Image (tube, helix red, strand yellow):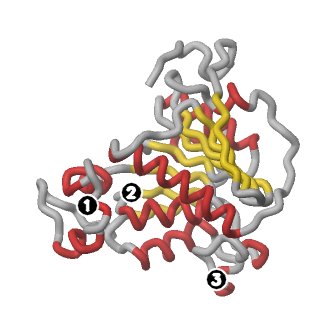
Amino acid sequence: MASVWSGMDMPDLDLKRYERQTRLSGWGVETQQRLKGSRVFVAGAGGLGCPAALNLALAGVGHIRVCDFDTVEISNLNRQFLYTEQSIGTNKAKSAQEALFSLNPEIDVEPVSDEITAHNVDDLVADAEVVIDCLDNFRTRHVLNLCAVTKGIPMVHGAIWGLEGRVIFLHPPSTPCLACIFPKTPPQEKSPAVGAVSCAIGSVQALETIKYLTGVGSVSTGRMLLLDFSTMKFQELEVTEDPRCPVCGQLGTGTE
């Protein structure tokens, strides 16, 4: 499925596909090559996971593992744009793979249809360099957070509620972990969701991931981005490590 670049050579098709982004200062062919060799785990292929995975694929991230055990329902189609009515009843991860491969056949998209649990999360995340949290419940988010902290890899958290969304780049010990910010698991609720909001937040999660992988630009270390699309007011909330955090509290602190 995936093509392999040798040395510093890029196929003509890839040179044309990524030409506009390689014009960015600090990007170029070497950075695109690095992106091609990157591995990202996308947890959840719903309203956030669809735009996150899409933007990773379009940017040329070489290996994207999309994990979702759920199936497509008609109520998903107002925001989960990788699916169509013909996708209803199919596994989201597998349907997302087909859609992404049709957009960029030069990358490897691996569908995982397992539910993330404390027993399998380490194997599912495997050798990913970044975890993108596109989940809709904190029980599983905390499982994913513990895995990311244990493996020493960053997690890009995103969430929406109606016309509001948030994103933060988490990479202890330079930042807090998710358990520092949300030590308790809130009750499970089905959030109101508008497609444009989830698309925007998922896209920001992908951009934070791409910046980390390429070294181009800076990520939102220690800052939670709060985006209120009802008023178009965007804020930053400074967050700090909890030295008593049971997940990352023993790692020590650091600065970027």
**Residue under the image location 48 percent in, 56 percent down:** 65
- Residue 120 visible in this rendered orientation of the protein: no
What residue did someone put label 2 on?
63
- Front residue (pair 173, 128): 173
Q: Residue furthest bottom?
A: 86
SS for callout 1 = helix
For disc 1, the neighbor class at 10 Å (few under 14, some 14 to 19, many from 20) is: few
Q: Are marks 1 and 3 in contact (CB under 8 Å)?
A: no
SS for callout 2 = strand
Q: Amino acid at mark 3?
A: Thr
Q: Which numbered marker is on residue 84?
A: 3
Q: Which percent across, then down, holds residue 142?
A: 69, 36
Tell me: 4 left or right of 201. Answer: left
For disc 2, the neighbor class at 10 Å (few under 14, some 14 to 19, many from 20) is: many
**Residue under the image location 55 percent in, 39 percent down:** 169
Q: Amino acid at mark 2?
A: His
